Image: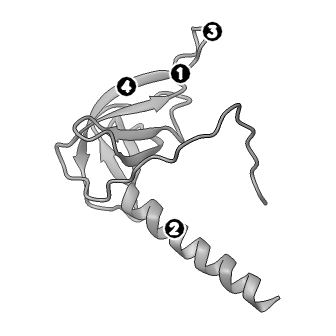
Amino acid sequence: MWLCMEVQRKLVPPVLDCGVSAGDKYYVHGQSTQAQADATSISHGMVAATELDAHSHIRGDIVAGAGDSGGGCFSVDTGKLVAMVVGSDTRTNKAILVPSAVICSILSDLSATLGAAGAAT
């Protein structure tokens, strides 16, 4: 299944930072402010833990709001993408994040798979 998105202008991909550390401050661009006409929101947080769990996730120190999933976590210091929000841990009230290094690995594996499939046809 392919997901298609239409945009009004050309989007520049974010620069990835794969060296996230505990204590790094970030801001999240999300969609958790549904009370406004423009539902975008920006939240500030800090990387709480960088040890990957069983799903290759790390934790932030803030709760991710409904609608923040898929939002980018950008370094306060560099502006680079350090992670992406994928949910919120209700037991600990911490944001669940996928670090950029994991995203790069997934994209690389996907590219290799698609390249191999194209070469076989």
The residue sitting at the left extreme is: 23
The secondary element bearing badge 3 is classed as: loop
Report which quarter residue 56 is drawn in.
bottom left
Q: Are marks 4 and 3 in contact (CB under 8 Å)?
A: no
Residue at x 67%, y 80% (from the top left corner): 115
Q: Amino acid at mark 2?
A: Ile
| x, y percent for residue 40 | 53, 21
Q: Which mark is residue 37?
A: 3
Residue placed under numbered mark 2 in the picture: 106
| x, y percent for residue 93 | 34, 34
Depth check: give the residue in front, 66 or 41. Answer: 41
Residue placed under numbered mark 1 in the picture: 40
Query: Label 1, label 4: how many angstroms apart (C-alpha)?
Result: 10 Å
Q: Are marks 3 and 2 in contact (CB under 8 Å)?
A: no
Where, quadrant-wise, is the C terminus in this rendering? bottom right
Residue at x 77%, y 91% (from the top left corner): 120
Query: Label 2, label 1: how many angstroms apart (C-alpha)?
Result: 27 Å
| x, y percent for residue 96 | 40, 45
Q: Are marks 2 and 1 in contact (CB under 8 Å)?
A: no
Residue placed under numbered mark 4 in the picture: 43
Q: Earlier in the sequence, mark 2 or mark 1?
A: 1
Q: Amino acid at mark 1?
A: Thr
| x, y percent for residue 108 | 52, 72
Query: Label 2, label 4: how many angstroms apart (C-alpha)?
Result: 26 Å
Report which quarter residue 31 is drawn in.
top right
The residue sitting at the front extreme is: 10
Where, quadrant-wise, is the N terminus in this rendering? bottom right
The secondary element bearing badge 1 is classed as: loop
The relative height of residue 55 versus residue 75 in the rendered view (above or below) is below
